[in-house]
Image (cartoon, rainbow, N blue to C red):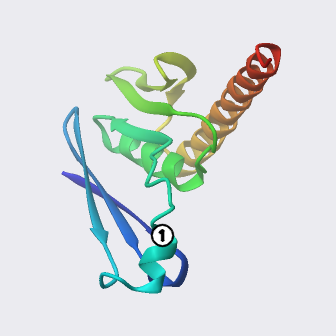
Amino acid sequence: MGLKTMTALKAEFCRSYRLFFFTLGNFALIGMLIGFTPEGSAAQDRDATDEGLEISGLVLDETKTKPGRDFYEYFTTYWQEVKGLQYTIIVSELPDTTRGTFIFVKVNDTLVYQQRLNPRPDVIENASKQAVRQVGVHMFQQLTAQKQLEEEFQF
């Protein structure tokens, strides 16, 4: 079972969020803990106007082997959230006993990256950096297209 934790603190520690991502095989479970300041505090009043917590993107692990998991760990280390887009990135693999493992990275069900993966750590890290760049380019193109559509249909 894998566990990923992400923590974000609001201004003056008024409200804190802790997101937990549990993975077990092909299943992922997301949990959230929220901490609040005492009722009636000035900090809570300022936060009352917040729009709330929004998860813009998820990165899911569907790997099966150690090289695949290492690729996923490197990928999530180098990946930075893209603001303004809702997305799901799935890192999966197809193990092959004769030729190594094949890694696939999909963004919203669109295949963006695929590569045969050599089990050497330096090769895995370089492949994950390349995947992050390709996914970043894909996301930039999506964001640009979305902004162009919004401008085109703006009255």
Give x and y (percent) for residue 64.
28, 35
Give x and y (percent) for residue 13.
46, 82
- 145 lies left or right of 131: right
Q: Residue at x 47, y 32 (%)?
A: 89
Q: Residue at x 46, y 75 (%)?
A: 45
In the image, residue 5 above or below residue 38? above
Residue underneath mark 1: 47
Picture quadrant where residue 149 is located: top right
Between 122 and 113, the one lying in front of the other is: 113
Between 146 and 140, the one lying in front of the other is: 146
In the image, residue 50 above or below residue 119? below
- 83 lies left or right of 59: right
Q: Residue at x 33, y 44 (%)?
A: 66
In the image, what residue type sits under mark 1? Answer: Asp
Disc 1 secondary structure class: helix
Between 91 and 149, the one lying in front of the other is: 149
Give x and y (percent) for residue 78.
59, 52
Picture quadrant where residue 135 is located: top right
In the image, residue 17 above or below residue 129? below
Give x and y (percent) for residue 3.
27, 57
Between 52 and 23, the one lying in front of the other is: 52
- 22 lies left or right of 42: left
Give the total of numbered labels: 1
Q: Name the quadrant of the C terminus.
A: top right
Q: Residues within 10 Å of mark 1 (few under 14, many from 20)?
A: some
Q: Residue at x 40, y 74 (%)?
A: 15
